[in-house]
Image: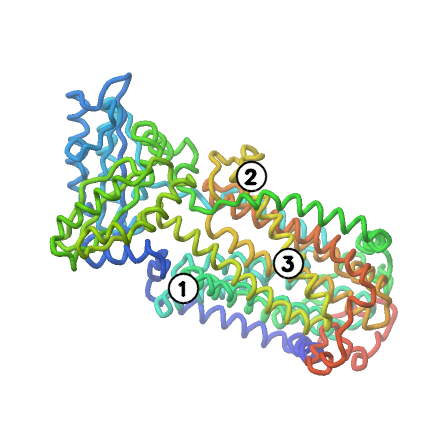
Amino acid sequence: MATLLYHLGRVAFRWRWFVTLLWVAVLGAVGFAATKAPAAPDDGFTMPGIESQKAFDLLEQRFPGTAADGASARIVFVAPNGEKVTATENRAAIEKLVTEAADGSQVASAVDPFTAKAVSKDASTAYSTVTFKVKADDLTDSAKTHLERAIDTARDAGLTVEVGGDALATQPAAGGSAEAIGIAIAAVVLLITFGSLAAAGLPLLTAIIGVAISMSGVLALGSTFGLSETTGTLATMLGLACGIDYALFVVSRYREERAKGHAPREAAGLAAGTAGSAVVFAGLTVVIALAGLSVVGIPMLTKMGLAAAGAVLLAVFICLTLVPAILGFWPNAVLSRRERKGKAKAGRGNGENGGSRWARIVVRHPVPVLLLGVVGLGAMALPALNLQLGMPGDEAKSTATTERRAYDDLAEGFGPGFNGPLTIVVDAKKAEDAKTAVTTISKEIAATDGVVSVSPARFNSAGDTAVFSATPATSPTDERTKQLVQTIRDERSGIESKSSGASFEVTGTTALNIDVAQKVQDALIPYLALVVGLAIVLLLLVFRSLLVPLKAALGFLLSVLAALGAVVAVFQEGHLASWLGVDQTGPIMSLMPIFLVGIVFGLAMDYEVFLVSRMREAYVHGDGPGQAIVSGFRHSARVVVAAALIMMAVFSGFIGAGASMIKMIGFGLAIAVLFDAFVVRMAIVPAVLSLLGHKAWYLPRWLDRVLPRMDVEGEALSHKVPAPVTDTPAAHLTPVP
C-alpha cells in the first residue's frame, strides 16, 4: 500500500498540470450534467414496515386526490378580554375567514369550527383546519398569501389568531452567522497550525472542490436514483470535514519530510505513501459507517449515507492526487516562513513539542489518566439511561413563533393531548356493514382509558374506508401517549372481532413519531454491531494487532455514550438549556443516536488511524512501546488537535440555528468530537497502550501469516527512498521542473 501510494504521489507531483486539469474537467463535466439534469424529486420521509406508514399508504390509495401527507394549517382563534368565540361579531369574523380560506386555489377543505364542534367548553378558543391538496413544499406563494390575508382580516376584528401546521410554518436558517463564524474559526486554526496562508488554504481549497463535485453529482443523478437536495446535506458536511482532515494530514507530513531534507517531489511521494495510507484506511472506516446506515431501513437515510460515503471516497482520491499536484506548483509556499528563509534546522522534527511532553506525562502516570478519563466519560454518559426518543414538534419552538403560540393555545383550551391526535384508518372493505363496523370500532376506541374523545368518521367515495381522530389525554411527547398507542394496538384483535370483518390501523404524526423511534431503537444494536465489527477487521489489517482495534472500538463507544448523555442532559432534562437558547425540553430526536454513531464513528476512527499509525510506524522502526507513544504524539498530536478543533467549530455553528433539532445535531456532534479527540484519543488511548506495552502490538503468528500486509507505516519505503541529499533545507527552496 505505502509503495503504491508513494509512486502515485510522485506521479501526481510530476504531472501536476495533467492531474489538475483532469480534476477541473471532472468538475466542469459533472457541473454541466447537474445543470442539464431534471429537477430532483421530493423523496419525502417514508418508513417501510411500520404500521403508521401502512396506514398512510392506505389513505392515499382509498382517498385519491388528496395526499395523506398534504399540507395543513390549523388556525386557532382566542376571544379577547374574556369574551367568547361564539359571540356574534367573533363568530362572524371566524366564519368569514373559513369561507375565504376555502376559496384558495390549492385548498382541499376548510372546516367551520362551529359546524365541526371545534370549540372549547368555555367557548374561549376555537380552531379551523385547512387542508391542502399538495405538500407544504409544493404550495405556491399565491396560495400562502391568500390564507395569510384572510388571517390578517380576522386579527383586525380583534381576535387572537395563531397558525399551527406545516402550511405556513417558518423555516429557520440552519446555522446563520454562527455557522459562518465556525468556518472562519476553522481557517484560523489551520493558519495557526501551519503558520502559512498557502498551507492553511490548500486543505480548504481541495475540500471545497471535492464537495462541489459530489454535490453536482447528487444533482446530476437525482432523477435517475431518486435523490433530492436533502440527500446531499450529510454529503456536504462530511465531504468538507473529511476533505479538510485528509489534506491537513498529508500537507503536514509533506512539511515534515521537507524539514528532514527531502526534495519536494520525494517529500510529496513520502507524504502520500505514509500519511496517504492512513487516509485510505480512515476513509474506509467512514465509508463503512455511512454505508451501514442502510440497515436502519429508512430509504431517505440510506440515500444520505451512500451519497455521503461517495463524497468521502472522493475526498480520499483528491487528497492522494490533487493535493500532491498542487504542491508541485508551489512546493515551498506551504512551508513556514522560517523554513522558506532557510533558518529551520534539518531533522528538527525529532525535538520536543507540546504533544510529546503530554505523552511523556501520560506514559509516566497511565493509571490516574485512564481512571480519570473513563470515570469522567462514564459520569457524562449516565443521563443516557433516561433517553426518550421522539420527534420534537411545535412545542419545542420558540414562543416568538406563531406555531408555538398556537400549540399552547390549543393545549390550554382543549387539553394537552389535542396537539397530537391519533388518526384511525378503518378498512371496511370486507365488512358486512361498513358504517356499523366503523361505528363499533369508534365506540371501542373511545372507551379506551386515556382517550378523551373521538371525531365523527369520514368515509371515502366508495364507502369502504373511513378515518377518524382519537384525542389522547396527554401530550404528544408524554410517555403515557406512547403507552396508549400500544394499548389500542394490543386490543386490536378484540375490537376487530366485534366489527364483522373490518380492520383498523393507528397513524397520525404522534403515532408515526412513536413508530419511527421504536424502529430506530431496534436498528441501533445491529447497526453498531455491523459498523464496529467491520471497522475492527479493517483496523486489524492496519495495525496488525488484536488489542489496538478492540481498544479503539471501546473508546468510541464510550465517547458516543458520553455525548448522548450530554444531549439528554441539555435537551431532555434542561441542564444549561437556556445557555444554548433551547426554549423547551422534550424527547431526543429519533435519528440522533444513529447520526451520532455514524458520523462520530467515522471521525473518531480518523483520529485513531492518524494518531496510532505514527505510533505503529515508530514501533516498527525500532522504538520501544513507551517511546513509540511519545514519537506518535510528537508528529501527530498537533494535526489531530487542529482537525478536532476545526470539526468542533463547524459543528458548533449549527448550535446557533433557530430549530431545536438542528441545535441538537450541532451540539451532539461538537461535544462528541470534544470527548473522542481530547479525552479518548489524547488521554485514554496512550494510557492503555502504555499499560499494555509490547502486548499492544501482539498478533498471533498464524494470524500474521494469514492477514495481507498493508504496510501503512511505510516500512517498505525505508529501503527504497534515497536519503536526504543535504542537511540544509534551504537548498531545496528552488523551483521544481
Q: Secondary structure at mark 1?
A: helix
Q: Residue at x 59, y 56 (%)?
A: 600
Residue 572 seen anywhere in this rendered image of the structure: yes
Relative side of 263 to 506, left or right:
right
Q: Residue at x 74, y 73 (%)?
A: 270
Q: Are marks 3 and 1 in contact (CB under 8 Å)?
A: no
Relative side of 711 to 427, left or right:
right
Q: Badge 1 is on which residue?
A: 219
Q: Amino acid at mark 3?
A: Ala
Q: Badge 3 is on which residue?
A: 604
Q: Residue at x 21, y 50 (%)?
A: 133
Measure how far apart labels 3 and 1 are at the Cα level: 29 Å
Q: Amino acid at mark 2?
A: Val
Relative side of 35 to 177, left or right:
left
Q: Badge 2 is on which residue?
A: 570
- Graded by Cα atoms within 10 Å as few (under 14), some (14 to 19) or many (20 or more), the crowding at tag 2 reads many
Residue 284 seen anywhere in this rendered image of the structure: no
